[in-house]
Image (tube, rainbow, N blue to C red):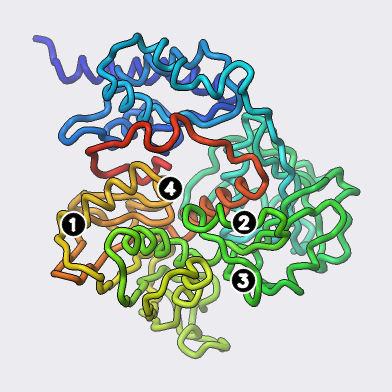
Amino acid sequence: MTNDHLDRWNAHEASAEAMIPIIGKLYREKGVTILLHSRSLVNKSVISILRTHRFARQIEGEELSIEETLPFLEALRELDLGPCKIDLGRLVAAYRAEGHGRSVPEFAAAVLAEVTDGNKAEPQGPRDVVLYGFGRIGRLVARLLIEKAGSGNGLNLRAVVVRKGGPEDLAKRASLLRRDSVHGQFNGTIKVDADNDTIIANGNVIRFIYSDDPTTVDYTAFGIDEAILIDNTGKWRDREGLSKHLRPGIAKVVLTAPGKGDVPNIVHGVNHRGLDLSERIVSCASCTTNAIVPPLRAMDDEFGIVRGHVETVHSFTNDQNLLDNYHKADRRGRSAPFNLVLTETGARSAVAKAMPDFKAKLTGSSIRVPTPDVSVAILNLQLERETTREEVLEYLRRVSLAGPLSRNLDYTAATDVVSSDFIGSRAASIVDANATIVDGDTAILYLWYDNEFGYSSQVVRTVQYISGIEYPTYPREGAAEPTGGVPVPADAH
């Protein structure tokens, strides 16, 4: 007796296996990134590709079939494409809307005419990147940069600047990159060349520069030019302090903490396109700011917000003490693994910097809890008009699938999710549909976010944009609006 379900699964696996070499070749030879409703399929496994199809639904009750997307991918392989991003979900939606009047190759060629032949974009990379500091965020940003280096058109991690911790410093740094208690094994190979102070990760040669004073480093001596430096230390947060990094070889500085004074605070997806690209110093704000600003933007655009309160339940960080000890902030001096710790959040004030047109009054506070990663922000909003839970959820689900926030905001309708399910999520935040409460003009949103990996992904998106190598996505927005769908997997972005 045959098993129809198993036969279908095997056929789907075979289709996903056929997609992998095409996706890889388009990425590495032409600089084309293949997406599925904004979720990258580059370097994904068979199971990950199938999961992304399973969750990226276009029509209510109907999955996006891999048998539909594979022919489009095969057609793309034959086109003369330049660097860009192509969303298979949008292509299929547009093809369905047309009524299949043309063959898949004819339709793909017509839709993508502006990125073929004489209209091809020219490669803009690689762009040198330097990490200043190699802590939790620094190492995760390094993983992301190494992962994205394959096309040669993107960001090239050239160096890491740290204070030397001892004679085995390089080996210990490599070990911390190789194995992570929260995020697991590094996906690839790492070799240590102690004689040349370098780590070779998946073929990327990364020089370690030992210094405790940014004003003493000449990056051109290491062959680094016009680089973007990412400061992961948080030691300097104002323009004067961060300007110390503007040394020979460094063109721009990006801070992975809230900027002070006139330093622009950027939340990718919300205000990054308004940034003056001549600006040499920018901040990526905080993980919590990145988590709450996209849904705030979405809710304000559709429903209007009169006032709100954000309460974050945040995993403990290195800023806290393992055991009770002196700390400049009283409560944070108490043992992180043993206590719920009330503290403040800077996200409230940072929202005003990221969304200066946001007029609603917002208050906020935070509770640090004994988990090592993943946090949840609870947004309690008074809206300008009454609505329903169904309307809010349908709207947020659509925002997560298409539009300017689709790379930043995810959505889950799973009934049993807990914080550890979102370790490794690349979204700035994930709407928990089942926890959402709506009563008249009051909406309470529960937003999960990996405060380490999700934030690091936002940092890399911002660096890609200011480097000038964030290529447009085709078909253009609006060519294929999805009309259905539900949760996306935590690893999809």
Residue 404 - label: 4
Residue sitting nearer the eye, 26 or 6: 26
**What amino acid type should be assigned to the residue bearing mark 1?**
Asn
Residue 388: image quadrant is bottom left
The picture places residue 36, in percent across and down from the top left corner, at 39, 32
> Pointer 3: residues within 10 angstroms few (<14), some, or many (20+)?
many
Residue 138 - label: 2
Q: At numbered mark 3, what does the secondary structure look like: helix, strand or loop?
A: loop
Per the image, the residue denoted by label 3 is 259
CB atoms at circles 4 and 3 under 8 Å apart? Answer: no
Residue 386: image quadrant is bottom left
**What amino acid type should be assigned to the residue bearing mark 4?**
Pro
The label nearer to you, 2 versus 1, is 1
Per the image, the residue denoted by label 1 is 434
- Ranked by sequence position, the earlier of labels 3 and 2 is 2
**What amino acid type should be assigned to the residue bearing mark 3?**
Gly
The picture places residue 29, in percent across and down from the top left corner, at 62, 20
Q: At numbered mark 4, what does the secondary structure look like: helix, strand or loop?
A: loop
- Ranked by sequence position, the earlier of labels 2 and 4 is 2
